[in-house]
Image: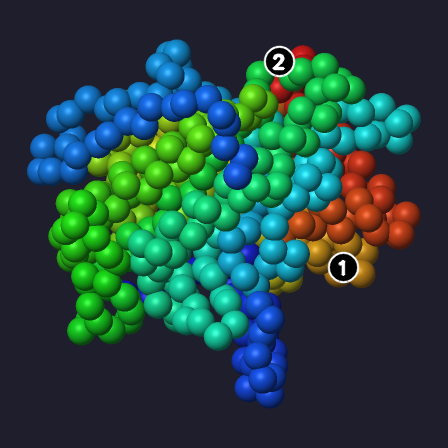
Amino acid sequence: MKIALTKKHKAMKRKSAQLFFIITIFTLFSLSFVLVNCASEDHSIPEYTYDDEDDEKDVDLYDWEKSRQSILASTDMVLLYGGGHQRIPFHWEKDRLKSYVTYIDTDNKEHWLFDSFLFLEIFDLESGKTTKMFTQGYNFDAANKEDWTNLIEYYFTSGAGIVALDASIKAASGVLGAPKTKRQVVIPIPEPIVRLNPNNLSSPSNYWGEIDGLALDFINTKDRVKACKWYINEVRRKFDEGNFQNVELAGFYWLAEDASSSHAILNSVASYLDKMKYSFNWIPFFNAEGRTQWKSFGFDYSYYQPNYFFSNDVPDSRLDVACKEALEYDMHMEIEFDHDALVSGGKDYKLRNYMKAFKDYGIWEKKRLAYYQGEASLLALKGSGNVEDNKLFHEFCQFVISRPIRGAE
């Protein structure tokens, strides 16, 4: 089956392909590449045995999970891509994150900005190694257990990722006082792709690795679910080890942006997360298969992508269509922009059109929003020496912090 890609990921794919070519040439003519914060407190680690009756079993909870009475709800979730070696810089460190944690307005007053942070990655392009994809739609090999493990380790790297986010919020709290609720972290669940090469039906389906000494075969639905549960538990374990004070693990994000290849396992994953009161989040692309059935798959929050920003061929009316459909099917929405939102890219008007349409349709006032901002395009707007770029940066941040749904911090 041909996999449809979002226009934003098509753009990212083109840029990554160019980077891959450059890295390959560099590798051929180079001789070589030169190549935790753990609390002292003793934590008990829940054990979970995987078998055919997993869905009927209770889940052992960490102490910080036991007090949660319901899933957590945020209002403004920013997407932070990282984990693939094509990202430059590679890590999200404290200095990069602080501009997403708080915003300083034109009167030099500081405000809390995003209240939720979605760390995610779609593939890992590393020089000298086979490029691996974490969701279908790219002409790479499917990521295996080792790749999934490396992604988890990346998010919990000392001095970066969630560790740096926790430190940045702590520093901001020293100035603003603690926010009324902890900032939230959402982690992606890689898609357990059935075959190593989805375009080749003879490609192996038992490529992923083992759990409890047994090799998984993704031709079996239960094995795909087992891999997801293993991943969720590893994230929970790492989060427990971090002993974070300013962030909480709020939920997980399904990385595949349509339901064509994963609808059979979504309810099982959703049921598992629901036992622990974690939100299950999805951001389907425009006209994605299954988008209107998102509730039946077990998702708690679905953010609809208009995919308006990326192509000049997409008319302004796309925003009207997307907003109407989101309201009809009770979806939340995503704002999208990248470096082309700068004056030099000529699409600053498109970002403004998102903000206007979302206000016109009441999305801004009452719906949760996700924010796709390229790799770090909000930082590019902020750091640009262009007066118009700086003006758009402030317009955007004011759009975020003044939303009625947020309430008072």
The quarter of the image holding the N terminus is: bottom left
Q: Which residue is mark 2?
A: 180
Q: In what element is the residue under mark 1?
A: loop
Q: At x 39% / y 69%, what residue is drawn? A: 140
Q: Please say if 216 is above or below 165.
A: below
Q: At x 18% / y 73%, what residue is drawn? A: 202
Q: Which mark is residue 346?
A: 1
Judge from the rendering whether residue 273 lies leftward or rightward of residue 120; answer left or right: left
Residue 9 picture location, percent across and down:
51, 59
Nearer the observer, 183 or 401: 183
The label nearer to you, 1 versus 2, is 2
Q: At x 72% / y 26%, what residue is drawn? A: 171
Q: Please say if 128 is above or below 318.
A: below
Which quarter of the figure has residue 55?
Answer: top left
- Residue density around tag 1, few if under 14, some if 14–19, many if 20 or more, within 10 Å: few
Asked whether residue 342 appears in the rendered view, the answer is yes
Residue 72 picture location, percent across and down:
45, 21
Judge from the rendering whether residue 228 lies leftward or rightward of residue 303; answer left or right: left
Q: Are marks 1 and 2 in contact (CB under 8 Å)?
A: no
Residue 365 picture location, percent across and down:
61, 23
Q: Residue furthest left?
A: 52
Q: Amino acid at mark 2?
A: Lys
**Display coloring:** rainbow
Mark 1 or mark 2: whose residue is earlier in sequence: 2
Judge from the rendering whether residue 396 lies leftward or rightward of residue 45; answer left or right: right
Residue 14 picture location, percent across and down:
55, 69
Q: CA distance from mark 1 to mark 2?
A: 38 Å
Q: In what element is the residue under mark 2?
A: loop
Q: Amino acid at mark 1?
A: Gly
Judge from the rendering whether residue 12 lies leftward or rightward of residue 113; answer left or right: left
